[in-house]
Image (cartoon, rainbow, N blue to C red):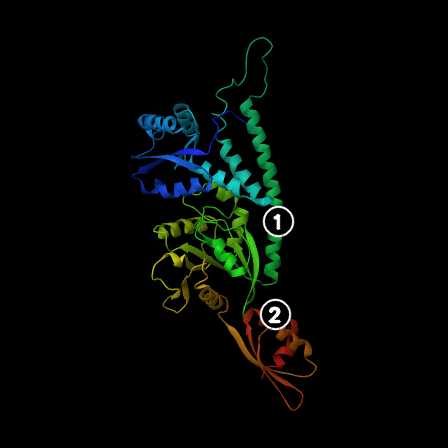
Amino acid sequence: MFERYEGGEQAVLVHVEFSNESAREDLEELKLLVSSAGVEAVSVMTTSRHSPDARLFIGSGKTEEVAAMVQATGAEIVIFNHPLSPSQERNIEREVKCRVLDRTGLILDIFAQRARTHEGKLQVELAQLRHISTRLIRGWTHLERQKGGIGLRGPGETQLETDRRLIRGRIKNILARLEKVSKQREQGRRSRQRAEIPTIALVGYTNAGKSTLFNRLTDADVYAADQLFATLDPTLRKYELPDVGSLIFADTVGFIRHLPHDLVAAFKATLQETRDAELLLHVMDCHDERMLDNQYEVDKVLAEIAASDVPQLLVMNKLDLVPDMQPRIVRDDDGKAREVWLSAQTGEGVDLLRQALHEWLVPQLMIEELRLGPNQGKLRSQLYQLQCVTDEHPQDDGDVIVSVRVPVVEWQRLLKQFGEQLTRSLC
């Protein structure tokens, strides 16, 4: 669409330590992002500033140092661990004579590589187009907008206006297609709600181990790797939990600090699974020293998508990387499970998670005895299908005393189906 230096597989990384806490980024996280994008970091430049330089972000002196690094290493791209304005990107490119990418562009590139489903690809393209649309004005600096002189006068549309119109049209087209996908997803959600099947969404910072835990719980084969944003597309799997019945587990995209707003907006439909869940399993890497900071970032994004009111159960994952740490359930003052410490990789503590889920999802069980006559075979068959019969005693008159443990939700459904016949059977 517009001429720029080509990006490559070898990069110089630029990291700035700002005095303002809210503007700080993590250098190790940048290295992980670069590695996840399939790029080799050949050199790293770090510096400190009170605030960004308006023209070159890191100032003219440091920009010259970066240019020298590029020359010495033969790097084909410079990656900043911070968001750059379009003019800053262009000015730095002019000085260092190679492609410049900021943190947002890097994350977008990783998302473009990882998207697998039709919906995921559309969402990534939407985010990319919104990002590019702010950078068009400096993409055409090598061309004249409209020429004058004999034979070339006229109203005409500038190349910049043409590009903007094409991008607006494509964004409109993608939004219409995403709306259609969203309606289909909403239809599936409504079907699950009508069937009263609870949804449990796995959320957490990227690379916390959500997909590994998802696979461990559901025997699924979702792609899981030790890299950032291994999962982009939401995956749903059915799971049977004793005394609860059917559940739906939803594996979702990982969060990251300063997640680009375009991406949050683009993935709203995907994150809807999070907002409509009965419970969030907030998966955390207990081996990561930034664990609490990561938790704060996830909670911030959950608030942004209106999911902060959904109950959370903390899952402290990667226990196998912490010496002398045993699987356990941490409870609050009321005895309710708040944290489960486990290792999704080895399977240690996963049974404790199932126990905690059972406690969360079955706060009440109807424990009753029913006297069923020979003509109530349909009700008796239904009870056995629900696997809620704990004991049975035939009587001399042909009736059967049946002991049942039924989740409240299932009991309400039985009342709707059998009504007075069920209530008359209570001993």
Tell me residue 120's x, y (percent).
56, 44
Which image quadrant for residue 309?
Answer: bottom left
- Furthest toward the top, the residue is 150
Task: Identify which amino acid the numbered label 1 is placed on.
Answer: Lys
Tell me: residue 130, above or below residue 147.
below
Q: Residue at x 49, y 47 (%)?
A: 230
Mark 1 lies on residue: 183
- Furthest toward the right, the residue is 375
Q: Secondary structure at mark 1?
A: helix
Q: Is residue 322 left or right of residue 115?
A: left
Q: Residue at x 43, y 64 (%)?
A: 349
Tell me: residue 181, above or below residue 323.
above
Task: Identify which amino acid the numbered label 2 is placed on.
Answer: Arg
Mark 2 lies on residue: 413
Tell me residue 214's x, y (percent).
51, 57
Tell me residue 402's x, y (percent).
60, 82
Q: Nearer the viewer, residue 251 or 380?
A: 251
Tell me residue 236's x, y (percent).
56, 55
Q: Nearer the viewer, residue 177 or 235?
A: 235
Q: Secondary structure at mark 2?
A: helix
> Can residue 151 be seen by looking at this rendering?
yes
Q: Residue at x 55, y 54 (%)?
A: 221
Q: Nearer the viewer, residue 123 or 182?
A: 123
Quadrant placement of the N terminus? top right
Which image quadrant for residue 220?
Answer: bottom right
Mark closest to the chain's N terminus, 1 or 2: 1
> Can residue 55 be seen by looking at this rendering?
no
- Furthest toward the bottom, the residue is 396
User: Residue 206 shows which numbered tag?
Assistant: none
Quadrant placement of the C terminus? bottom right
